[in-house]
Amino acid sequence: MSAPNAKALFDCLAIGSRLCEYGQTTTERELHLFAYLSRLLSVYEGIPASEWGYTFLGTESGAPFSLEVRDALDHLLYSRLVFADGATLRFSEDVKIRVDAISAHRMHQLRTRLIDAACSALTVLPRGALAAALSADPQLTVAAMAPANRELFTEHYLELIYRQVDILKAAMPAGTHDMRVPASVWMSALHEASLQ
Amino acid sequence: MTTPQKASHQFRFPEIRDVRLQRFSLFAAEPDALIVADKRVLCLVGANGIGKTSLLSAIVYALTGAVPLLSAKFESMEEYVKLARAQSVPFFRGRVREDDRPHSTVQLTLRFGSVTLSVVRSLTDPDGLVSFSRSTPNGQQHVPPATSTATELNDSYRAAVVELSGFSSFDEFVFLCHFLCTFDEHRRTLLWSGRAMERVLFKAFGIDSEGAASVDVLVRKEEKADSQVRNRQWELTRLRDRVAQLSAKIAHESQSQENYDALAERHRQLSETFALVRGRLDECSSEMHDARLRTANLTLSESSIRREYATLFSESLLTFGSTSGHPLIVRSLSDQACGLCGTRSEQAVARIRAAAAESHCPLCESLLSARDDGKASMERLRQLDEALAATSAQVAEAQNALHDCSHRYHALESALASIQNELSDFEKANQAFVERIRQPVNDERAAVVLDTLRGQILAIEDQKREAAKARDSARAEIAALKRELSKQYAAVEGAFVPRFQELATHFLGLPLSVSLDTSAATGATFVVTVRGSARRSQGQLSESQRFFLDIALRLALIQHMSRLDQPGTLFLDTPEGSLDIAYEKRAGEMLAKFAKSKDCIILTANLNSSKLLLALARNCGREGMKVCRLTDWAELSEVQVAEEAVFREAYDAIDSAMEQSAS
């Protein structure tokens, strides 16, 4: 097995350990979803694309997918840090301990903030509703209908995203630094759009 | 092209074995003192004004026939030695009683390898010797014939020194003893001494003496030619001004003088401004070069740390976990029943729990890959993360500094172009002015003068071109020699730089390095970098740092140049006088490190509470150091006599320090 993408590995672990707190479980689909949401928030923060470290693809179903996240998950399963029970994934206690240690590194501070903000969207929407909200994301919607342009966050799609970001920033109170606020507002707005 | 030499450990510096004075009346109680230098460090200790500098200078004088010169304006090594010899006799006037001076001598016994030389030199005759002899370890002695004159004895000594040391001339030996091996009361640094440093570099790193000597000749040739270019230019300007003046006089006599004065003043202002901006641009260029290098090094360092982090990150996270997280195990433990067969008993559950914690599979009992709690790699990751944060901050700082420097450089470039255009326009306009006012001449004589002047202008323009050609040719030859020097240095840099760093870093306590710079207008030199920042001028370091970095460089050069079986000797005159208290102990340790390798130090020191002397004593001990109490030899002043108890206390402290090392 070749070494996994280090950033995708970190994101998998960080997202997985947050979603599996208090004995809960998660799924591979949720890992891709929350990684994608974190990536969206990185655009909001103005972080250069090259910093993210891996790519996303749109799918026919409208869900986001990352090959690197899939590969990282395979490694975690192989190392018995994650266990699969059908479609359900359970992250072991070992994972939480390791993630807590490395999340404190300056190297990961920004990423940790983005993932925390993404996972905090669960305080306003349950998991099912969040997945539905993201399916209303303009980038994913367009990519679902364009098999030739499935790679996300390219020039082809950035205009769509920047428009959303500009609207969101205009709606934010001045001096908002907590990423959880725009994350929740954004997902709530997408959820409303998905109901229409 | 010069012949490359073996670059390291080629020469023998002299090892002083003993010093005997005769009628050296500065030391009233011991005018005929004998000092045996049988330890690596010989320390001549005394109070202020007692004659320490005079004694050390006398030793160097006996060795080289000259006292180190204070103001070093010389064009060649040979010129320096001539000037130093000429200053030597007046040096001792006033230091030794007048009726003793004609009879005062200094005798030295010194060794080069297995050969011992003994010289006796009078304080009033630097060009002759009172006696000279040479002997080998098997007892064979060579004594020149008894009829030999003082000059002939001196010639024999000089020839012997050249033969045994490996230097190519006695003048070269004197030059190196004075500039490299002596740090005297004048505190003249080698590192920032321009041509002297260049000469030492050529010798130390393998350019042969012919090549090194030709640098002197070429530099003089280049400077002379450059001076001729400037002089011719000045003459041309003057002649053109005269032509303008004369022409103007023919047509508009009263007005032309004012115009001429105003024009001349304006030209002078523009030329001065041009030179000033040019100078600033050159300085900024050096700064930018240093800043670029620093940024590149730091960025490389940052990339390297990131790579290491990324590699270790995956390796340390993907260590195998236990089976206790497997859904079947989790369900079994939460349901308190075996998830496979459904058995509900405390024993069964306890067995499942124990098995999950072990290194065997609870189901088939296969041996699982060893678990690793990953603590060591987590700790390493944390260290790398901190290092990366620090380096990233330094990169940002270096990039800002480079950006500022670049911004200033471009501004200066624009300013220079602007002033250059203005000057050029002015000169063209001035020419046009001259041409415009040239009119059919009424005065025949004035016309003849004008023609003569114009003829002279043409001739001088030719001379200027020739001088420029000669200057450029000399510059090209100098550049070739410097390239050769760079090549030779590169071959030994890996050994030399760590040698210097070992000595200097201990003293300074800051990361530093040294590199060869052959691009400087002042000649090839070393550039010392402290904390990543180049210190090209002396003012960029404190006095303590400046002097002791210079001493560390000399130590490293002596170690590099001297043969492995021959100690080099360094002469230091009250080095602690240049230090602030924080550095004294470290300076003593640095000197002790040098002496412990194989080399020798003869130093003078004030009898005070200096930690340098105590650190040196502690590190060398009685086995490595000898103290000579000059206060016992000299006539003390009233104040000094009254404080003799303080002197004794200070000597006792040195003795204790030497004893501490022994125990």
Image (cartoon, grey):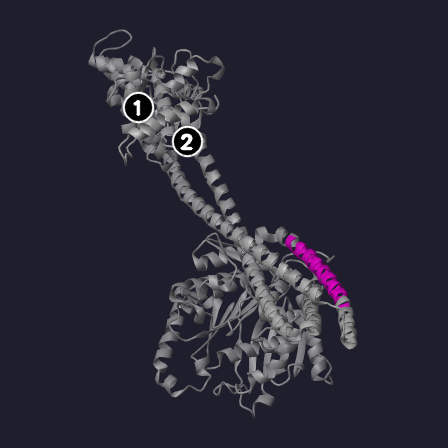
Q: On the image, which quarter does residue B374 sit in? A: top left
**Please, is residue B155 above or below residue A150 in the view?**
below
**Mainly helix, strand or loop, the magenta region?**
helix
Q: Residue furthest bottom?
A: B99
Q: Where is residue B153 shown, x and y percent of the image? A: 70, 80
Residue at 53 percent across and 51 percent down: it is B410
Q: Where is residue B73 shown, x and y percent of the image? A: 61, 73
- The quadrant the N terminus of chain B occupies is bottom right
- The quadrant the C terminus of chain B occupies is bottom left
Q: Which residues are magenta?
A: B459-486
Neighbor class of circle 2 (other Cα within 10 Å; few <14, some 14-19, many 20+) is many
Asked whether residue B343 appears in the rendered view, the answer is yes
**Residue matched to label 2:** B313
Residue B466 within the magenta-colored segment of the rendering: yes
Residue A130 or residue B579, whichever sits in front? A130
Neighbor class of circle 1 (other Cα within 10 Å; few <14, some 14-19, many 20+) is many
Asked whether residue B367 appears in the rendered view, the answer is no
Residue B464 or residue B648, whichever sits in front? B464
Task: Identify the amino acid type marked 1.
Answer: Trp
Residue at 38 percent across and 63 percent down: it is B582
Residue B463 image label: none
Q: Residue furthest top?
A: B341
Identify the secondary structure beneath mark 2.
helix
